[in-house]
Image (cartoon, coloured by chain):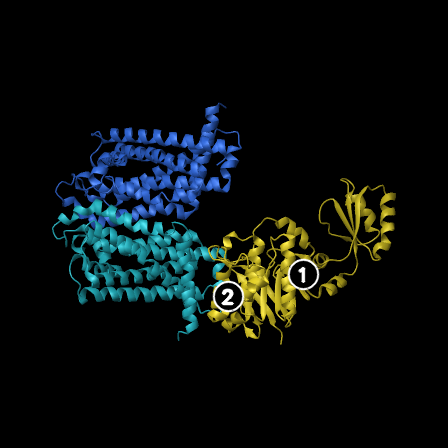
Chain colours: A cyan, B blue, C yellow
Amino acid sequence: MVRRQDLATIAALVGRAKNELIRVPGAAIPGVLAPTIFFLGLNGVFGNLTQLTGFTTDSYASFLVAVSLLQGAGFTGAATGVNLARDIEGGWLDRLLASPAPRWVLLSGMVLSASLRAFIPATAVLLVAFAIGAHWPGLDGLLIAYAMVAATAAIAACYSSALALRYRTQAAAPLMQAGMLALILLTTAYAPLALMQGWLQDIAEVNPMTQVVDAVRQGFVGGITWDGTWPGILALAGMLTILGALSLRGMRRTAA
Amino acid sequence: MSGLAVNLRVIRALGIRSIRQTFRRPQLIAPIVVFPTLLLAIQTGGAGGAVNLPGFPPVQSFLQFMLAGAMMQSLMLAANSGGIALAVDIEMGFTDRLFAAPISRYAVVLGRLAGTAALGVAGALWFLAVGLVFGAEIAGGVPGALVAIALTASAAVAIGGIGSAIALRTGKSSIVQGMFPLIFVILFLSTAFFPENLLVEPARTIAAYNPMSFVVEGIREPIVAGLNGTDVLDATIAVLGIGAFSLLLSARALRHRLRTGG
Amino acid sequence: MPAIVVEGLERAFDDMLAVQGVDLAVDEGEIYGFLGPNGAGKTTTVRMLTTLLLPTGGRAAVAGHDVVKEARAVRASIGVALQEAALDPLMTGRELIRLQATLQGIPTAEGRRRADDLLERVDLVAAADRRIGAYSGGMQRRLDLAAALVHEPRVLFLDEPTTGLDPVSRKTIWEEVRALNDEGTTVFLTTQYLEEADQLADNVGIIDRGRIVAEGTPESLKAEIGNPHVRLALAEGSIAQAEEVCRRIGKLLPPKDARTVLVEVENGSADIPRVVRALDEAGVEVGSLDLVNPTLDDVFVEKTGHHLEREEAADAGQEPAEA
C-alpha cells in the first residue's frame, strides 16, 4: 500500500535531483547536446538512404527522430545510474538507507526524476527535427512519443541503478552508457527491418526496443494505429518489470 | 648520454605510463574501442544497403568502406582521452612533479602524445583485425595496412596536440571532456561514415573542406583501393598541417603555464 | 531494557573476519565510547547496528528491535552521523534537514519547524540557506549532527564525529553531544581519539582486530592498569644502557619511538628521584623526564601489546581502512 508519506519522500527525492540541473551551470547541456548532435549528424550522413528501394519514407529526419528521442532518454537514464554511483561513493546513499523510507520508495524517486528530466532532451530533439523538416506526428503521436520517452528513461534508470548498486563506483559509467546505446541502436534505428543486414535484422526482430522505436516512429512516418502501438507498450512494460525488479533487488541487497 | 637520448628516454617512460593508465582503467578503454566497435557493427548492419545507392564508390562491402571511419573515431577519442588525462595530471599536481625534474618541459607533452600514438596504433590494429574477421579485404595488402596504421598513429598525435593544448591552457579535465561532443560533430561533417557525394547538405559542402575528410580518405584508400591514388599524400599533408597547428598551440599553452603557474 | 544489546556479533568479508564475536550492552541514556585504531572493526560494527550491513553471525538489538528482523523499526529509532559526512554539496543546510525530516516520516510543516530549531541549536542559522559545498569541515559536521536529530531519536550513532576537525570545532561537537545526552539520548560514539573517549564516555569498549579487548568506565579501566610510568627522552646511543638501569627499578613498557624509554613506577612521583639517581650514576644523558599517569592508551597497550596512539600517528593521512 502506498502511503502519503511515501509519496512525500518520492517528491522530495525528485526535488533534490532537479538541483543538478538548476544549480550546476550548463549541467543540462550535455544531455541535450548529445542526442541533438547525433540526430543532425546522422541525418546529414545517412539522409540519402531514403533513395533505397523499400525505404518506408522520403524524409530521413522523420525516420530517425524516434531513435534520437529514445537515445536522449537512454542517456538521461544512464546519467541517473552514474549519479547514484557517485552518491554511493560519497556516502549519500547511506543516509537514505539508514532512514525508515522503504527501498522501493528510494528507487522510485530516482527513476521518476529520470523520466521527468528526459523531457528536456526530447523537446530539444523535436524542435530541431521539425526545423529541418520532419513530419508533424499529430497530438496523439506526440503524446505517444513523450510517454515512451519517459518510460524508456525509467528503464535506463533502473538498468544503470542496478549496475551502480552492483559495482558501487562511477567507473561503471561506460557499462551503463554502452548497454543503453546497444539496446536502442540494435533496432530499426537506421533503416527499416527489410533493408537491414542479416545478423542485425535477426537481433532487431527479437529486441523488445524495436517495438518501442516503431511505435514512436509511426506518427512521424505515417499514421497511428493501435496495432502499431500496443507492442511498444508491452515491450516497455516487460522491460520495466524486469529491470525494475533487478534494481530493487540491488537496493535491498546493499546491506549484504 | 646526450640530451636528445635523455629526452627520448623520458618521452618513452611517460608514454608507457600513459598507456598503462589507459589499460588499467576500463572506463578509458570503452570510448576508444567499445563504442566505435559497437557503432561500426550497428551502422554496417543498419545502413549496409547504402552500397546499392547510385554514386556509391566501388567497394567490396560497406564494412570495408566503414573501417576507416571507425579508426578515425577511435583515434580522435584516444586523442581526447590523452588531453583529459593530462588535465587530470595537472589537477592532481603530477605535472608539477614532472616540471620540477631535470627534464625537458616539452618531453612532458610529447610523452603524453607518444602514449596517444600507441593507442592510435592499437585502435587501428583492432579495427583492421575486426574487418578481416568479418570478411573485409585490405586491397593494399600488408603495405596498405601499414600505411593506414602509420597515418592513424600520426593523426592521433596531431589531433592529440589540440587536446593537450586545451589541457595545458585550462588545467581542467571537465573542459577537455566537454570537447567530446565536438568530436562527433567533426566526424559527422566529414566523409568518415559516408561518401562526400551522398552526404546531405550542408554536411556535403563542409565535408569537402574539412581536413578530417582528407585524413579519413587517406586511411581508407589503402583499404578499399590499394596504394595507387593520391589520397594518402593528401592525408599526409593534412596531418602535417594539423600537427603543426596543434604543436604550436601546445607549445604556447605550455609556455603560458610555466610562466604563470596556471 | 538496554538501548543496545550485542551478542557474538560477527562480520566476514571474503576470507577476512572484520568483526569477531563482539558482545556489549549500552544502557538507556548512556554515552558509550567505542575506541580502537583504524581497521579495528569500529565502523563495520556501527554499520551493522545501523542496519547498513548484515551480520554474518551473532545478533544485535537497538532500541528493542532486532537489527536484521526489524530493520525498519531500528531505522525509525536511530539517528546516524557516519564517518563520511554524506552531504550533498548542491543542497543548502536547511534543505538537507528538511529532506531528512521527510525521510523520517515527519509531516512537512513540522519538519520545517524542527529544521529551524536544529539550525539554531547547532549555530548554522546564518549559513542555513547557503550551499553545503561552501561549508567548512566543522560546519558540515554540525549540520550532519543536526540532520541526525531531526526525528528525536532514542539512540544516536556517531562514527568518528570529530576526525579531521580543529580543536575548537571538536570541543563544540563535544558540548553538543553532552547536551544531547543530558536530554536523555543514548549515544554510541566511535572514535580513535583517547581524549574524546575519556572526556565524553560513561563506558568505553576497546576494540582491536575485530574483538573487544577491554570494557568499562574510563576510570575503572585505567585503575586496572594501576601504575603510572616514567617517560624518558634520551640521546642517541643511550637507549640500551637506560633500559638496563630502568629494568632494575620497574617494569619496562613498549616504547612509542626509538628515543624513548618507558618504565612503570609503583610509587608514582616518589620514585622519580630514584630513577634520576640511577641514570646519573650510570652516566646516561637524559633529554627530558615526565611522570605519566595511566591513559586509555596504556590500557590498550596492556591488552594488545601495541599503542593506539602510535598507530594513529602511523596512519595519519591515510584513508580509513574500513568500509
Looking at the picture, how far across and down is residue A185, in whole percent?
A: 26, 53
Q: Residue at x 76, y 58 (%)?
A: C294
Chain for mark 2?
A: A
Q: Quadrant of residue C293?
A: bottom right
Residue to which mark 1 is pinned: C197
Q: Position of residue B19 (x, y in %)?
A: 42, 40
C162 or B154, nearer to the observer? C162
Residue pictured at 28% horizontal, 31% vertical = B238
Q: Image check: C311 left or right of C153?
A: right
Above or below, A201 relative to A112: above
- Cα distance between the residues tagged 2 and 1: 25 Å
Circle 2 is placed at which residue position?
Answer: A98
> Which element type, helix, strand or loop, lies under badge 2?
loop
Residue at screen point 40% across, 36% down? B164
Q: Amino acid at mark 1?
A: Ala
Left or right side of B102 for B18? left
Q: Describe the element under mark 1 as helix, strand or loop.
A: helix
Amino acid carrying label 2: it is Ala
Q: Is residue C207 visible?
A: no
Return the residue found at the far top: B2
Disc 1 sits on a residue from what chain?
Answer: C
Residue A93 seen anywhere in this rendered image of the structure: yes
